[in-house]
Image (tube, grey):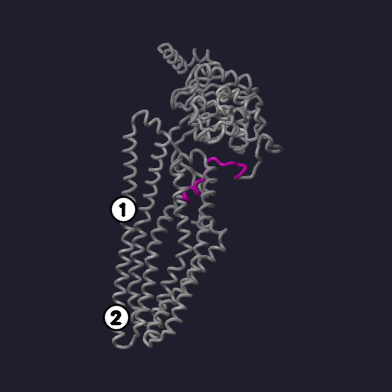
Amino acid sequence: MKQLTKFLKPYTKLLIIGPMFKLFEAILELFLPFFMSKVIDIGVANKDKGYILAMGGIMLITAVVGVCFALVCQYSASLVSQGVGTDIRNAMFEHIGTLSNAELDKFGTASLINRITNDINQVQLAVAMLIRLVIRAPFLCIGGLIMAFILDMRLSVIMIIVLPVFVLILFLTMMKTVPLYRTVQKKLDQIALVLRENLSGVRVIRAFARTDYEREKFGMRNREYSDNAIRVGKVSALLNPLTSLVMNFAIGAIIWFGGIQVNLGSMATGEVIAFIGYVTQILAALIVISNLVVIFTKAYACAGRIIEVFETKASITDLERSKGIIKNPEESSGEQNKYLKDRNEDIIVEFKDVSMSYQTGIRKGKDSTERDAEKGNPDIEHISFRIKRGETIGIIGGTGSGKSTVVNLIPRFYDVQEGSVCVNGMDVREYSLDILRDKIGIVPQNTVLFTGTITENIRWGKEEATDEEVRAAAEIAQASEFIQALPEGYETLIYRGGVNVSGGQRQRLTIARALVRKPEILILDDSFNALDFVTDAALRKAIKLNTKNMTTFLVSQRASTIRNADQIIVLNEGEIAGIGKHENLLKNCDVYREICQSQEMQSTVY
């Protein structure tokens, strides 16, 4: 829990002020039964109205001052809980941003959203209750017990019997509910996942008439969540009846034995009433504690899920941040120049016997340096090639052959398990991530646009890009024509994910976003699949003519898209089946020839 307690440090003063005022309120509350006993034994017994009014005024002032103290505590609790929740969210969001794709794949988007919202809300509530009630409830129990002992030692034996029963009930409840709450939160993750998939894929679901299926799927997940929530609710629901039963039993015993003491003349009526008041305060405080157990049990389970995210270390570390070494190894000097002795200035990207698998564990904790899970079968294996500056490289292969995996290793979205990937003669693991990725413009398979204008979306590639640069990038990407046809042109608002533009238009905008930064390396990962053949050809020609010395990787399923590339890399089941130009591969590479022939047959049929 040390991961989360550090977030309380900025609020140390409020953490002292809040409980302190709540303690003052509890002290004043303890005086009320005592004052009431005096009103009965002196004022009522002697029919002294003046005494009754005087003590009533004191009790009223005590209650008003107690309310003021409670308000100060409430205000402090609100400031601390909301502040801590905000700080944890900011820290978690920042930490998630440092995680590599492997860690993000492990948690899943739905789970991370649930942790940063619902789980932190539970921790927030626990912090508020910590300030408001954790001091007050135990103090009322202890203070009430002391006052009860002062009034009558014999009746206090009842409290000594009752308290262990309360503690036992609370302990058993907590032992049972903590694991159940963890399960409930996991089921909530699954609901969030199904809901997210349904909302983002609603058009596909309707197009394939799968609404009923998805409704049943959501209903099943919802029932699983509700069944687990009901199970934990049943256990938690036993707290109040059991504690009320014990409390009422204690009060009944006090009235019984107290009545006997009054008849014998060893106790006054007011003392019995005061004793009942203290017992009521004690047992009411214990009921509050029982409810706190439920809140803190939930918070404990949620805190564990939050800490799990914080303790997950990125498998891809930024050397600049972790070790404080040079940002750009290409600008190194002195002893570090030894890394560049064999550097060929014409070679910009080189894969040296690279193997990589997604089926690997993720490092956790400060001292862990090994992967948790055993390495699975490689997704790509023994990949080696060298790319010269300014070349256009086509990458083709069947589905699952490793095309995207290869290009994702260049910006270091994942790390290799064997071999090395070099950019400008330097292993990508020696670069600062910011410097490495500044050299690369990438257009992923799944086009992603953000809410904002077209200009703002293109400027994601280069924040300080001028209007001329934005328009030039759109011109090369073959996007300027449809942008200018829009009523508001470049100031047209793009809705979430780009739902108000077509698939081909989204692809061209994302290509413009990559081009505006004028990268050394441009990666187009199957980014032409929504374009017609005319636009495809015009786009490739424009990129070739307007991007001097830019090395371009074209990942595509279409042989026509990459046939004019300087080199074509053919992948088959994670291995290189051939490298060369189109004509040579047709003669010497069976895999490439089969791809071309199958696509020619399809075009003939259609």
Using the rendered image of the protein, determine whether residue 347 is visible from the camera's viewpoint: no
Tell me which residue sits at (29%, 88%) in the image: 264
Q: Judging from the image, what secondary structure is the residue with disc 2 in?
A: helix
Q: Which residue is labeled 2 in the image?
A: 257
Q: Amino acid at mark 1?
A: Arg
Q: Which mark is residue 231?
A: 1
Determine whether, in the image, residue 474 is placed left or right of residue 286: right
The image quadrant where one finds the C terminus is top left
Q: Residue furthest top?
A: 604
The one of 357 and 558 positioned closer to us in this rendering = 558
Earlier-in-chain disc, 2 versus 1: 1
Along the line of sight, which residue is nearer the eye, 280 or 12? 280
Residue that sits furthest to the right in the current view:
334
Depicted 547 relative to depicted 272: above or below: above
> Observer-nearest residue: 73 or 521?
73
On the image, the x and y values in percent for residue 295 come to: 41, 58
Percent position (x, y) of residue 168? 34, 66
Q: Position of residue 290 (x, y in %)?
A: 37, 63
User: From what the image shows, is residue 359 above or below residue 548?
Assistant: below
Magenta stretch, residue numbers: 306-321
Q: Disc 2 residue type? A: Phe
